[in-house]
Image (tube, rainbow, N blue to C red):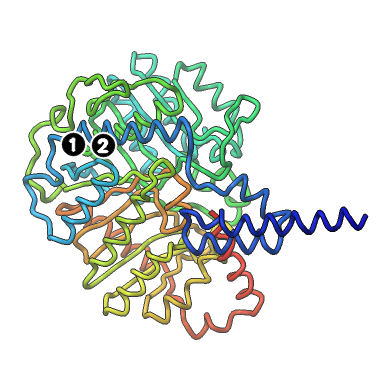
Amino acid sequence: MASFALAFVIIEYLVKIIAVGVVPENRKPSSSLGWLLLILFLPVVGVPLFLILGSPYVHRRRARIQARANTLLEKGTAGLPSTPESVTLPADLAGIVDLSRALTALPMVTGSNHGVEMDYRASIRRMTRLAEQATTSIHAEIYIMARDEATEDFFLALEAAVRRGVTVRVLLDHLGSRKYPGFRRFLRSMTAAGIEWHLMMPFQPLRGKARRIDLRNHRKLLVVDGTTAIMGSQNLIAATYGSAKNERIGRRWNDITVELTGEIVSSLEAVFAVDWYTESGEVVDIHAYRDFDGRELEGGILTTVHTPAPPVGGRVNALQLIPSGPGFRTEPNLKVFTSLIYTARHRLAIVSPYFVPDESVLAAIITAAFRGVQVELYVSEVADQYMVDRAQASYYQALLDAGVTIYRYPAPEVLHTKCFLIDDTCAVLGSSNMDLRSFGLNYEISLLAYGGDVVDQVAEVIATYAARSSVLDEATWKKRSPLRRYMESAMRLTSALQ
């Protein structure tokens, strides 16, 4: 018995010694510290969790596909300037556009805005209208999909499109969607209708499809006929997310989407093509770039499938798509967001339902506030996830101390929009939160806009949220209970475990 106990102690210390040298490799200090604390104090729990969740990257086939796609995207856009010739960017913004292109291969191009939409049902009706008008293809890629009373017309439109000869392809995240009512019936209905579909990031160990279970494809996009696209923060599900309790207490999700035409659609179509190939192995004949075997597709580069780039202004915007995710080892959204925040001179307004920032983002925000920038943060009064609610609240005091104004959207509703505004001159919107999950674990897409009406419409969205929200009072915030403070600190620590 004594020898067994001695062996256990020796093994435990060996595990801890090895962890000190292995865990911090290529990992941020906060993440390293979180994992080490868990492993050193609770090795029985920490070691298995680290082995399952310890790597934020995809490996093998997915990593190879993304790396190859990045190379092909770079070749496919080689003939395009980094910014449209019809616009002159401020020097600091031009540098960030170059940075984003270096990280993702996608340049800034032109695109026409057909409206930033705040109305949840109106967004779904708009998607339905586009599906009804489709003549050649519909490509839908959305994190959560469910067939319910809010989305039924959209799926009926997809079925009708198939009957008239339109190719319909659908991607939905496996673990993100499966928990909602009627999931299997929904998949069977798509198969019966002739809709081609695949699960993104499937976790099916019995079929040989197993990976880190908390990696997600969080993107939301729709591309119709290669000419019109919709993207934003909204999932394809009723605003109450299929919950009778949410319906009863009035909890609904608030989101935005934007409808686009022009060159930017090819960037969105290329993202879909990479994700479709990743899940299906099928090369989609898109209107831009090259296929995965190096053969040039019709069109070759972005601009050949659209009319000449129009002057930027009014409805026409200078737009750059920023894809990110575990396949990108360079964290494009994190680097671009941080760089943009440092350019703020007068106003920085951030809407993020899940605000658990990287150290660099937090430093940039606080620095902006100390520089005299008017900094506003918009969050839900109560987040829909307990751990996130407590983790993000742990940052409020530091933000308040720096002079940041925190707006809280009234409970029980959920502010799910992800966007931010810099000096009322450029805006970002999409699927990416200002949190560690969006920076490291989720596949995301974000849209950087300059020079047209997208910025003004995002500013209107934020003004609407401000009018509905209450400002967090610092004196009241300091009076929260010791238990509440403890849980905030504990949940903040767990957020670093990635």
Residue placed farthest to the right in the image? 1
Q: Where residue 242 sits in the image (x, y, percent)?
A: 57, 43
Would you name the residue on which mark 2 appears?
A: 267
Residue 365: give its label: none
* Amino acid type of the residue that numbered disc 2 sits on in the rendered structure: Ser
For label 2, the SS is helix
Q: Where residue 153 sits in the image (x, y, percent)?
A: 43, 30
Q: Is residue 414 left or right of residue 10?
A: left
Quadrant location, the N terminus: bottom right
Q: How many marks?
A: 2
Residue placed farthest to the bottom in the image? 475
For label 1, the SS is loop
- Which of 137 and 404 lies nearest the eye of the viewer? 404
Q: Is residue 310 left or right of residue 300?
A: left
- Which of 344 and 384 lies nearest the eye of the viewer? 344
Q: Are marks 1 and 2 in contact (CB under 8 Å)?
A: yes
- Vertical order, 103 against 172 (above or below): below
Callout 2 crowding tier (Cα within 10 Å): few <14, some 14–19, many ≥20: many
Q: Who's the residue at 37% across and 50% down the image?
A: 331
| Distance in Å between CA atoms under marks 1 and 2 | 7 Å
Callout 1 crowding tier (Cα within 10 Å): few <14, some 14–19, many ≥20: many
- Vertical order, 376 against 236 (above or below): below
Q: Where residue 55 sits in the image (x, y, percent)?
A: 53, 47
Would you name the residue on which mark 1 appears?
A: 263
Q: Who's the residue at 38% across and 35% down the image?
A: 66
Q: Who's the residue at 33% across and 37% down the image?
A: 126
Whether residue 250 appears in this view of the structure is no
